Image: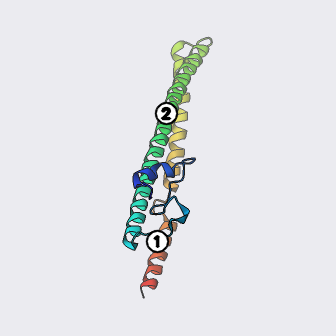
Amino acid sequence: MTSSYTPETAAGAAMPGAPVPPQRGLSDDPSAGEDTRTLGAIVGDISADVSALMRQEVQLAKTELKQEASRLGKGAGMLGGAGFAGYMTALFLSLTLTFVLDIWLPLWAGALITAAVWGIAAAVLAMTGRKKLQEANPDLPETRQTLKEDVQWAKAQKN
């Protein structure tokens, strides 16, 4: 008596805690003897099992990627919301500064001073960002060197 193990039932075996499927071609009766299948049948069974296992691994990877993408999307949305909240905070702090300056100066002067503070901040950030961009090296010298070494290694293996 042989078991009815198929590649489709292997899906359950790949999951943690799932029962181990019986081996193909072997009898449940220990006195039944050796496996009577041909070598071709055994190789075919192994090939089907490997194929099923690979499909399961791909499906698992897809599921995990969907879950991670969902988490990343939620996190990005929350960061976007935090950025907007930060913008609104800066806006209202600017208005507060303008009205505080209005105590000692005319309203237009307080608004002008607040705008000047933001202009200076923008100029400093722009200069710092420009400097960082100029310092960047898009040539990727280390990667280029390792790729050259890989090519040389491959040529040496060919010879």
Q: Mark 1 points at which residue?
A: 147
**Against 83, is 142 above or below?**
below
Q: Name the residue under label 2.
A: 74
The residue drawn where x is 46% and y is 59% is 138
**How far across and down, in percent of the image, does residue 83 sit?**
52, 30
The residue drawn where x is 44% and y is 42% is 66
What is the secondary structure assignment of the residue under circle 2? helix
**Against 84, is 126 above or below?**
below
Q: Locate the C terminus and report the quarter of the image it occupies.
A: bottom left
**How far across and down, in percent of the image, does residue 115 sit?**
51, 25
| Residue 62 appears in the rendering | yes
Three-letter code, disc 1: Leu
Tell me the colour scheme of the image: rainbow
Q: Would you call the spot at circle 2 few (<14 residues within 10 Å), some (14-19), or many (20 or more)?
A: few
**How far across and down, in percent of the image, does residue 102 sit?**
58, 13
Depth check, mark 1 against mark 2: the one in front is 2
Q: What label does residue 63 carry, if any?
A: none
Which of marks 2 and 1 precedes in the sequence?
A: 2
Three-letter code, disc 2: Lys
Distance between the alpha carbons at the discs numbered 1 and 2? 37 Å
What is the secondary structure assignment of the residue under circle 1? helix
